[in-house]
Image: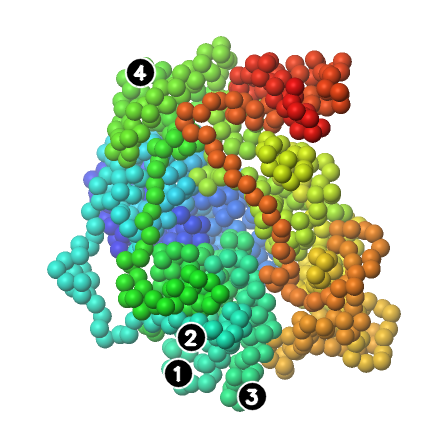
Amino acid sequence: EAYLAVAATVALHRRLTSGSRPGTDVITRYTYRLLTQQQFLRTARLICALEVVRRREKELGDEPFTAGLWIGEKDAPNKFTDADDRCSEILTEQRPRNRLGLERCPWCGTRIIPKRKSDRSAYGFDNRPGSFRFHCPDPACIFTEELPVNTVDEHLYREPPTFLVATVDKFARLVWVEEAGVFLGAGDRLPPGLIIQDELHLLSGPLGTTVGIYEAAISTVCGLHGAPPKMVASTATIRDSGSQARALYGRNVAVFPPSGLSVDDSWFAVTDTEQPGRRYIGVMSACNTPSTSMVRMSAILQQVINEVDLSPAEHDAYATLVAYHNSLRELGKTVTFARDDIPARMRLVASTTEHLRRIPDDQLVELTSNVDSEEVAELLSRLEAEPGDPDFVAFLATTNMFSVGVDVQRLGLMLVNGQPKTTSDYIQSSSRVGRGKVPGLVVTHYSSTKPRDRSHYEHFHAYHQALYRHVEPTSVTPFSVPSRRRALHAALVILVRHGLGFTGKASAGAVDFSSPGYIEAKETFLERAQLADPAEATATREDLKRLEETWQQEADQTGDAALYYDAHRPHRGLLIHTDSHGRGWKTMNSMRAVDSESPLCSQGEDPQTKRTVRSSQALVPFGVGAIYDHLGESFVACDTGQWAGTTGRIIPFDRLAEKLGVEEFRLPPVKTRDEGCLPFVRFPRWLFCPSCRKMWFWNEETGQRPECGETTCRGSSRLAPMRFLMICQQGHLGDVDWHQWAHSNGDQHCNTRELDFKTLSNRGGGLSSLEIRCRTCKSSRSLDGLTMPGTAESVGMACPGRQPWEHRPAGACQEVPLIVQRGASNVHYPQLSSALDIPPGSDHDENKTVEEALRASKAFEYVVSAIGSNGEANVTFAGLFDILLTEVRAAGTEVTEEFAKEVVYRRWGNKHGKPSQ
């Protein structure tokens, strides 16, 4: 990596000129966790090399070069106690999952966590109370005592690394964490000398806008502690980079390398005319449905390596087919095809039986945002495996997550299912193949039923001959009105907390906004705003002044008590989290923190079981009747009639409520507000043990998580869901009657439910290689033809006439059921109604904000209920109304009695279909 060489130069220069003065020399920032983890391993390898040099060269001092990973808690532990808990779990697992943030020794490549449970010496970590470190498990490695890397936030704050590798949104933690300022030069430390931003084009839209306003505060703080850092940003797909850089960093851009006089020779880079480049092929079938042509192309692309003469390198490059999709729904459909239709088509196109390529089920994998971090790391490792390796992947179904951060040299074949939404996505994703010595082949499948796809197919040559000309411009507006409302106060807190030294949790009230130090910091920040968006500079100054006044009022009202940045009762705090209610500035915990999490609960299980879904996804794609896969478990969302006990916030939207004939709209319950949970039921209820292959029909009332009860089973005890279910046109969902299926080939029909789900190695891939076998009478039947229309009816299966969450007896449904895979796109079609609510501009009247605060109060509905059907308030109204006013005013919203009564009676009128009084 070119910029790693620049970073190493900065670190060595600092060490030679500034000695071993502590501080972070280089910060590298990425937008995606996948890319961050990959680049951390590369950075760690560089750090190991620097450390080898330091040990040899005495003038580089005694302080080691180190690297740190600063990322979300799902990918690496935030505290030493978290690290202890994860280490304890890892040591007890039969197939350990790495949740520590480092997969391999960056120097020699030895795995930090073994694939299977092993002796303690095979684990490359040492954890003690208040301490955590990595070491290489290989005794022959020079870093067998300790690796110069760490991933625990507490350790990074205590010993700031030379190189900090982080996700860009993690810098929102600067507002909340007093110790985080060490990365910017707090105390006697030097500020970073170089900041590297990878994939600059991804800092656009809402994320880029939020990053821009935080970045203004970060660069100001660095400047207060020393010289501002140099900035290096890399991107392959960007338009008008100068405007974007000014908005994000307040600086002018110098492009490197310069274009030179010739496109084929810029001195820094020369076109390679000896090796063929990546080839793009466009395919659109006017005779077949898009699904049919997709199946046929996939079959040919996977079978062809067994039909033509290829060198070993070519065979390896084209053995893995990467199928890129624009949505999870399309991906689910392709995965269904990959397990049945595509293998069936491969049998037809194979020249001989000997040439038929057989793809086992475990070689079909998905890479999406729904995959957990430890699984992503394992999958990336599997993609390096060549054919014949047990970890080899033959078919990878993925989304735009694949377009950034995947650098696997051996991949050479991609099928793009439909024109991606942006040219930037298309360039980034297709460039993931053909990065090695074998040229890449990209086949783009266009749908004849989509006008945009047809247009791209008709202009295929012109489009691909000038791809970069079609890259879309980006928009970044960090100092716009909505952005200032969302994050200007956070930038102010960063300035005060880490720039002026008021870092302590209880020091928010000690700030003097008239001090020379603050005025200098403020003016530097406003200069940045002027450079980024001159039109908004004056308004930004005025908003900043109002924030100062509010802050000072909060400090004055605490009296002798301390004002905290983040506090819980009885203390007073300046900040609250975005999904909380109460007094204070709502502040993001992450720059992507635009959505809260809703807890899920499964019937019959401990309500403390930790499962969550993004609140915005509780309607789509995981709304009523949708299948939700979570860490190998499968659930279905219950209808709203099962939502008793949830108290999500009411959203005032009277016009839409009247149109739809509903009483009110509520947000899904939010995890941090203790508002209940979303009810799900485990489905399908037929499960199997991946180790011993025994099938179990799970009873939800057991109150336990599904585990194999077979005493002779020696593998993992957790059961996996069967991937098939029954649906009908009336919207019913049901389990496949596997007992009926196993006995449908003969006359024998025993009454036991002792079944096995077998894989037959002698039948190749596809459903024909899967079999249901009765343990008692040995009757069996393969799954070949299972998903064909009419199959369920032909073996005597009927639609259950109910939903999985309904406990009533099966009803009479005359529809013919269809057996499909859980991931099939036709399982769930939500019926949606939508409306547009345009937010007010900067000059809007505050009444709507006050009304939302009233309706969000838990006392509001009680007040409305205290009004009788005749519109007369009962005896409890006055007391409840006083409670409502007290709650809203305590949360920091000013409201008059007259306006509050107007809102209450308007709500009463909507409930009773009467005009408000």
**In this rendering, which labeled residue sits more in front, label 1 or label 3?**
3
Q: Which mark is residue 515?
A: 4
Residue 136, image x, y percentages: 44, 56
Q: Give the alpha-carbon distance from disc 3 to disc 2, as whole Å.
A: 21 Å
Check disc 4 and give the amino acid type.
Ser
- The answer to whether one can see residue 520 in this image is yes
Residue ID for mark 3: 353
Q: Report, in whole angstroms, how far the alpha carbon at label 1 lies from the one at label 2.
A: 10 Å
Find residue 652 and report its image quarter: top right
**Which residue, given by chain and number where applicable, does mark 2 sit on?**
318
Residue nearest the observer in this picture, 159 or 720: 720
Name the residue that disc number 1 marks: 310
Of all residues, the one furthest to the front in this rendering is: 915
Q: Amino acid at mark 3?
A: Thr
Dot 4 falls on a residue whose secondary structure is: loop
Find numbered disc 1 in the image and state the secondary structure of the residue it sits on: loop
- Tell me the kind of residue under disc 2: Tyr
The nearer-to-camera label among 3 and 4 is 3
Q: Is residue 127 above or below residue 883?
A: below
Q: For the residue carrying disc 4, how many other residues have a C-alpha within 10 Å: few (<14), some (14-19), or many (20+)?
A: few
Is residue 588 placed above or below 446 in the rendered structure? Answer: above
- Separation of disc 1 and disc 4 at Cα? 74 Å
Circle 2 SS class:
loop
Label 1 or label 3, whichever comes before in sequence order: 1
**Residue 379 located left or right of residue 842:** right
